[in-house]
Amino acid sequence: MAETITATESLEPPTPEPTVADERLARRSVWKRFLIRPEFGALAGAAVVWVLFAWQAKDTWLTSGGTATYLDTAALYGLSAVAIALLMIGGEFDLSSGVMVGTAGMFTGLFAVHSGFNFWLAMALSLVICLAIGFLNGYMVIKSGLPSFIVTLGTFFILRGFNLWLTQDITNQTNVTGVDRTGGFSAAEKLFASAPIKIGGTEFRVDILWFIGLTAVAAWVLLRTKIGNWIFAVGGNKEAARRVGVPANATKIGLFMVVAACGWLHGMVVLAQTGRSNVIEGVGQEFYFIIAAVLGGCLLTGGFGSAVGAALGCLILGMTQQGIVLAGWDNNLYFLFLGVILLVAAFANEWIRNWATRAGRPSKPPDAAVAGNGVGGDRARRQPRAEVGGEARA
Amino acid sequence: MPDLIELDNVSKYFGNVIALTGITTSVRAGEVTCVLGDNGAGKSTFIKILSGVHPHDTGRFLVEGREVHYSSPRDARADGIATVYQDLAMEPLMSVWRNFFLGSEPTKGWGPFRYFDVAASKKTAVEELRKMGIDVRDPDQPVGTLSGGELQSVAIARAVYFGAKALILDEPTSSLGVRQSGMVLKYIIAARDAGLGVIFITHNPHHAYPVGDRFLILKRGRSLGNFPKAEISREELTKLMAGGAELEELAHEIESLIPEAVEEILP
């Protein structure tokens, strides 16, 4: 009915009309609704990669051992990447998320081995430190108004330098050994590095369960709580969100702290698996986390994305990293592959979203003011005024 | 019953700049007060006083007969004065129901397991929009896919649902085409009929006249008059709004350049 109104018609108040089947609804088929979901690309990508290696490494890929290997790799990435996805949906980056893994391990190791604290106390103290760093990241971004890319790049180098300096000063090495002999370690090992599931003689490590659990919680928070609504909103249009009463700054700072806490969890899993803390653990992985989030449909400009998608993105990374080894290819191809899928995913995200958001609209724009088809997610976010103005979405 | 909002000789100064002076008008529940003016006439300052962004300096500002002096937008909101800004406070990539309840999400459950009541939110959003006469095809569709007029209606419906008594609409039709503007005018009437006092800010007398019950015309921070509809015709309104004499002068100027263009300008 909206299509038939003109300004010169009688301006009677609109009467609630019985719902008639809307001819425009049909254009948004079930198939398109599925395509518009942010997880779609990652799901399709994961299927393609799985088939590729099932073919190229057929002797090992389908065994439970092969599966356990790539799941473990994916799970470790996922502990950080799922949190990064939430942060990116909230419109921010964290380049210090990789170094946070080593930072958490280092502080835990130093407190446990060199301060003589119980391992659990050492873990708790390092969690507090990580949360404080996350808070500072968020606080600096909010207060300065600078892009989080720059602020966390600074934190990244500060932590990287500080960690190496401190550890070498205390241990003369770049790692803290002897962590596995401290009191309380064996219980922590059960929690973070045991292998509770055995299938056909192959052990599936507990970090896979942590990964699945974390993904489920993140997805639930994002899609089914008000905080999730706020995360989408602060990433989409922070000022607008604040105007309707969303605590925008608290949401953003909270996201940075969640990323730090998940980095800590990631660090504890690595520490429990290896029994020593390597200071440079995680450094360089911050980009993998971002790639996984983008593969999972996160927009670099915020306001759109998925936790489950990021988890699937991690699965793609894990499968590729291990698949290349199992297929006997050159290891360096992994980086080449990362670059290619990142570009493909970014292009595909943009294209699918353009196509699918258009799919819900009348095929013929009712107003001549429509210039181009600027329905791109980023453009929509950056120029809400212009979008409305040009009626580009009519 | 006192008027919903009453302004009596209200002025606002920024340093020694007179932003707005001697403004008198009223807004009644179930009526539309149109505020007209060209760029720089003081419409923005007018909105900001009513919505609590800037406190007024002199004169009396009464809400339901009670004199108020707002110091923050929260005060205005608490009194039921809602403002729909030009940029609409909408997240284009978020769905209709998520936008509708943003900042006031209904929750269910207990303690840390409180969750966003999605089913009720979708249902309410669709119902409330239907009351405004808009049939949302699908509450899950991103608001960015709605037309400009529909976007306005979501913002208006949201304000109505969350208990606004007075609704300030900041140039809701300024960037829309003819058909979409018509839609927005219908939503203004729907809000009026829902018992709200509507303050419709515009520079277009043709949009204001059909829906307005009262017209306040601003020019360079001063009031050119505050008329009930019975006291002013569409032609007079247009002329006042455009600044009659100035327009004729402009017409002569253009006539010397393009003679045939003048008929377009002078009503």
Image (cartoon, coloured by chain):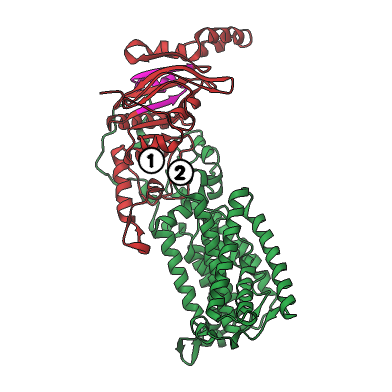
Looking at the picture, which amino acid does disc 2 mark?
Met
User: Is A310 on the left or on the right of B154, as rendered?
Assistant: right
Q: Which residue is mark 1?
A: B154
Residue B27's place in the image compared with B151, above or below, is: above
Residue B208 is one of the magenta-drawn residues: yes
At horizontal 36% and vertical 59% (from top left) the residue drawn is: B115
Q: Taking the image as drawn, is residue A80 in sight? A: no
**Chain A representation colour:** green
- The picture quadrant where one finds residue B131 is top left
Q: Between disc 2 and disc 1, whose residue precedes?
A: 2
Looking at the picture, which amino acid does disc 1 mark?
Val
- Give coordinates of residue A38: x percent, y percent: 48, 60
Q: Residue furthest bottom?
A: A201
- Give coordinates of residue A18: x percent, y percent: 24, 42
**Secondary-structure class at tag 1:** helix
Residues drawn in magenta? B198-218
Q: Nearer the viewer, residue B153 or B134?
A: B153
Label 2 close to label 1 by CB (< 8 Å): yes
**Badge 2 sits on which subunit?**
B
- Give coordinates of residue B84: x percent, y percent: 43, 35
- Give coordinates of residue A188: x percent, y percent: 51, 82
**Chain B representation colour:** red
Tag shown at residue A300: none
Q: Taking the image as drawn, is residue B107 in sight? A: yes
Q: Nearer the viewer, residue A278 or B117?
A: A278
At horizontal 53% and vertical 17% (from top left) the residue drawn is: B220
Q: Nearer the viewer, residue A214 or A326?
A: A214
Q: Which residue is mark 2?
A: B90
User: Is A113 on the left or on the right of B230, as rendered?
Assistant: right
**Badge 1 sits on which subunit?**
B
Q: CA distance from mark 2 to mark 1?
A: 9 Å
At horizontal 58% and vertical 86% (from top left) the residue drawn is: A182
